Amino acid sequence: MPNIVPQYPALLYQRYLIREVSLAVLLVLAALLSLYSFFDLLGELRNLGRGTFYLPQITMYVALRMPGRAYELMPIAVLIGSLYALTTLARHSEIDVLRTSGLPTGTLLTTLLKIASVFALFTLFCGELLAPSAERAAQHLYISSTQRLIGQEFRSGVWLKDGATFINVRSVTPDSRLLGVRIYHFTADNRELAAVSEAARGKHLGDGRWQLEDVTHTRLSEKRATIERQAQSTWESNVTPNILDVLVVPPDRMSIYQLHAYTRHLAGNKQKTSRYRIALWKKIVYPLSTLVMIALALPFGYTHTRSSSVSLKIFLGVMTGIFFYMLNGLFSSLGTIHAWSPWLSAFIPSLLFFLVAMTMLRWVERR
């Protein structure tokens, strides 16, 4: 049969597919964001009245978290939106017209991947620029409004390691000021405690320097301990406010740069990095999952469907998206527990779904 499709001016069918699929994906994304924001709003109402955390602050807090939600929901929105668009085209026999006109499956898949690549770039933009800064602002708003301090990892506060120094901070304010600082200085081999410094407060001055207030230095020797008190003291450390931001922003909402910097800090101090290395690779791989999702939706466009079965396929798309989201979290946890390769833990879910998409596509072509 002659190939009629390439004769269309300016590849009209491509523009038509791009418009239909893109509009469906954006509509689904808006619906999912509205739904999740509504449930976030309901969930935060339990904190209504804590400090100055009233309805305007709650609404702003939920709005600031929306870029992070958009980042998480984009692959699911691409899957459901493209499923809806392609099954609608199949119901109107438009996919059949394109195929009988000589449109190869590879060309159709390439067109869909072009659409998905745009959403992948948008996902990357949200994950790298919008979500980390918005999440940080949201947490700072929550902490300052509820008059809380940044949560501690232990009852004694936050523990950090910087070379031969161990730092214990009782709490951190939203502007990265330290309260209740205790610094343990060990010898180069980390076997003997050489000195302990305690300060009531700490403020970052830049260039790796902190200003400590109400400081007590205790220096230890073989026979005695000497105590020195100062109103102010300068402390040089590689610990920066960016590292302390990890206490505010969870790993999945951090940027690739932040994860890379914090992973290097942990590795330099011989601490476990698996959790953050897996999060780093997930941030690299996650935008590519939009390509996998749209490839997974294509086989449904090759099947004849009625109006009653469109809703069933949308339901299957929702369940598939939820399963993909859960599988991502599962492999992250398994990778951390079993010390798997970070890139392998991040790639496996997308690779499995891609293989399923290619298998389904070959099956519907042979029918």
Image (cartoon, rainbow, N blue to C red):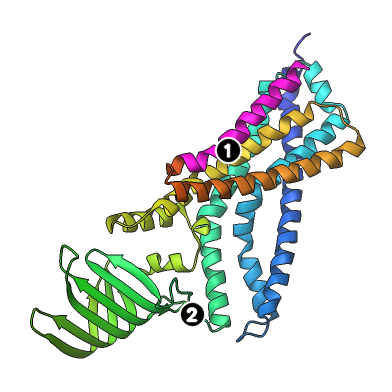
SS type, badge 2: loop
Where residue 199 appears, as percent x and y from the top left, is 29, 85
- At x 69%, y 21%, the residue is 362
Residue 272 horizontal side relative to residue 87, left or right:
left
SS type, badge 1: helix
Pointer 1: what residue? 350
In this view of the protein, which residue sits in the foreground, 272 or 107?
272
- At x 65%, y 26%, the residue is 358
Residue 167 visible: yes
In this view of the protein, which residue sits in the foreground, 264 or 27?
264
- Label 1 Cα neighbours within 10 Å, binned few <14 / some 14-19 / many ≥20: many
- At x 42%, y 77%, the residue is 172
Where residue 248 appears, as percent x and y from the top left, is 49, 68
Q: Is 360 part of what is drawn in magenta?
A: yes
Q: Is 298 part of what is drawn in magenta?
A: no
Where residue 180 appears, as percent x and y from the top left, is 36, 83
Pointer 2: what residue? 149
Q: Which mark is residue 324?
A: none
Amino acid identity at mark 1: Ser
Label pair 1/2, CB-CB below 8 angstroms: no
Cα–Cα gap, marks 1 and 2: 38 Å
Residue 206 visible: no
Amino acid identity at mark 2: Leu
- Label 2 Cα neighbours within 10 Å, binned few <14 / some 14-19 / many ≥20: some
Where residue 196 appears, as percent x and y from the top left, is 22, 79
Q: Main secondary structure of the magenta part?
A: helix
Q: Quadrant of residue 178?
A: bottom left
Residue 295 horizontal side relative to residue 337, left or right:
right
**What span is in magenta?**
344-367
Q: What number of labels is visible?
A: 2
